[in-house]
Each structure stands twice: as C-alpha cells, then as structure tokens.
Image (cartoon, rainbow, N blue to C red):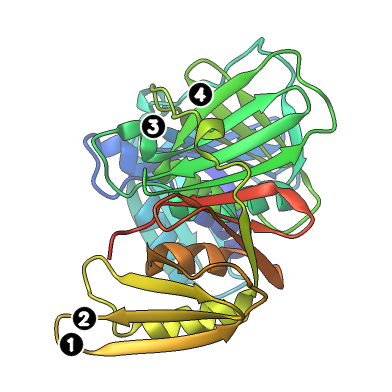
Amino acid sequence: MLFLESTRDQLLQPLLATSGVVEKRQTKPILANVLLERDAGRLGLTATDGEMQLAVHIDASELPGEEGRLTVNAKKLLDILRSLPEGAVIRLERDGESRLVLRCGRSRFTLQALPAEEFPRLVPPEGEDAPMRLTQRELRRLIALTSYAMAQQDIRYYLVGMLFAAEGDRLDVVTTDSHRLAHCAQPLAEPLASAREAIVPRKAVGELQRLLTDSDDTVEVRIADKQIVFRFKDSEFLSKIIDGRFPDFRRVIPQGHPIRVSFVRTELQQALQRVAILASDKIRPVKLSFSPGLVRLSSHNAEQEEAIEEIEIAYDGEPLEIGFNVGYLLDVLSALTNEVVHLSLKDGNAAALITVPEDERFEYVVMPMRL
C-alpha cells in the first residue's frame, strides 16, 4: 500500500526539524522512531523523548498516497534521505504492519515499522486560558539574552532550566546558576487574566532555540500545570516543566548602586578575551581595578604569568578593586549586541549589575570573586 509519494526535500525538511528531539540513548526502542500520520490532506511528523515533543505538519493534499499511521526509526530514515540526490522522487510503501519500504529510482530500503498505537505521544493541555502571543524574533531574543546563565548540572534541579513568569501584560524570562543571573522582559500585546510560571528544562530550551527564526511570525505560548506549549504556524513544541520553586529574581537584582561605569561593549569584550588567556584554568579570575579615568584588567596563573589591559573610562570616584570569573563577563558581552554597556557597582564585595542604555528590560547580575 502506498503511504506517500513526494520529493526527497518535502520529507527531509520536517524530518530534520523533528529528529533533534529524538533521544540518542533510549530506554524504549519506539522513542528512536518518528510517528508519521497522514490524515485530511496533511502529513504530520512527531518525535518525542518522553519529556518533550515536536510535531510538524506539511500540506499533503496534492501528494499521492493513502491515510494511515506508522512509526519508523528517525535516524535511519534521515540518513537515507540525506544520501539521496536533491529533487529525487521517493515512495513510502507499507509492507504489512511491521515493514516500511522506501523506493527511489533503483534504490530500495526496507525498514522496521513499530505500531503507531505504541508511540508515547504527549497530549497538549486543553481548556486553558488564552495563550501569550509573541513574534519569533522577540522570543528568540529573550532566550538568547538569558540562556547562557542556566546551570549546567546542579542538585538544585530547578536551576538547570529557564523560568517563564507571565503576569498582566509582561513576560519575564530568567536564568541563574547561583553565581550569576540573567533577566529579560517582554511586554505582551494582550494582558493575561492570571499569573503563570513555568521552569523549562535546559534540553527543551536548546531545542526551542533551534526552532526559532529571526522573523515576525507569531508564536503562541501556553503554560499549563505540568507543561508548556509553543505553537508555530505549522508545528507544535511541547515540554514538561520542572516541578520546583525558582528563586525570587526580583530580590537578587541590586537597586541603587552608586557607581555606574560605561564601556564600549566590543572594547571591553576584546580586552577581557586577551586577559583571559593567562587566567588560571579552573576559576578564571580577572581583577578590575578602577581609578580616576581608567580601569585596569589583570589576570595571573600558577606559573606566575600575568596579563594587563587598560581602558580609559569616565570614572572619578575612589580607587576600587573587584574580581570576577572572566567567563561570566564574556558570556553576557557575547550575547548582547548593544554598542554600550553599563556596569553598576557598590563596592568590591557586592554583586555587580550589567545593563544597557535605554532598555530596562535586560539585567545581568554577577557575583564578585575573592582574589
């Protein structure tokens, strides 16, 4: 029975999108598969690892074949399609209940097909409040400006994720590893009836970054009790959320620091990159020494090697020294695109605040190091 006849590229693009969700080390064989569903003129491809799920749909109304459902190994199907020439016509044929035959010219591949009924599909929430609506560009910016501050591994599992906190006409996105905190806000066109929060796992954040484009296309975000759903024009990404209480980021962000120094972002970034070369490998400390009209950046290591950079700045206060993990500074400077950044300080022991001119929606807090 003919399931689908299409060009190689028509099937390759949605398969590429969904294959990123497939877990490489599965506990169940069917989690290595992609679910193919043909119904009412549409072809749907769905992949899941049990914690998150991506479904992509394409118009199949003009493509020969019959309605039905099956699952097949995603990686094997992807590798076959990649190996075929661009524009090639392929045929997917069902051979009983447990085989899928792919034909292309004189090539023939027979793949195992597991029952679609066994596919562990995650069911999106129904009957919830109206979703938030943002452009893909806005959501992509929120994630880019905060994702680097997520914890890599931590027994406090709620830190290995990204907080989405929505209330009224505002969405706050926050990450922290307890040494630094990144926060960015986005106004919403339509106020929400009730406040909502969700901690999105690190892996799901990475997959979402891969899906988003720099466009004005709308993405709907819906937060439920145990899930968060992102709906695009032709796809739906769903993730379970972390069950935990995220730290109150509002209490962490410093207020009223008396010292504020302005830097040309690229100048500071390049100076830190050079100083970082000789910083100690493990904790990578760099010292900022402020004096009237000047800041000196310095680092050293166990071999008694030293790097020093000097930048002229508008500073007329008392001499001040403060140390940071240089990686924490480079992360935020790499994520920002603004020409100028502000560094607000209280003293050498208090958390510092990095902001950008004329934009109160972004804040980055970094704890100092003892040198």
Mark 1–mark 4 distance (CA, rounded to whole Å): 52 Å
- Of callouts 3 and 2, which one flags the residue occurring earlier in the amino acid sequence? 3
Task: Determine whether label 2 and label 1 are within 8 Å by CB.
Answer: yes
- Which residue shows up at 43% across the image and 43% down it? 176
Mark 3–mark 4 distance (CA, rounded to whole Å): 10 Å
Q: Position of residue 25 (x, y in %)?
A: 23, 46
Task: Determine whether label 3 and label 4 are within 8 Å by CB.
Answer: no
Mark 4–mark 2 distance (CA, rounded to whole Å): 46 Å
Q: Residue 51's mark?
A: 3
Instruction: Using the rendered image of the protein, determine whether residue 20 is visible from the camera's viewpoint.
Output: no
Amino acid identity at mark 3: Glu
Q: Which residue is mark 2?
A: 301
Mark 3–mark 1 distance (CA, rounded to whole Å): 48 Å
Quadrant of residue 124 within the rendered picture: top right
- Which residue shows up at 27% across the image and 46% down it? 153
Mark 3–mark 2 distance (CA, rounded to whole Å): 43 Å
Q: Residues within 10 Å of mark 3 (few under 14, many from 20)?
A: some
Please give left or right for residue 204 compared with residue 268 in the image: left
Q: Which residue is mark 1?
A: 304
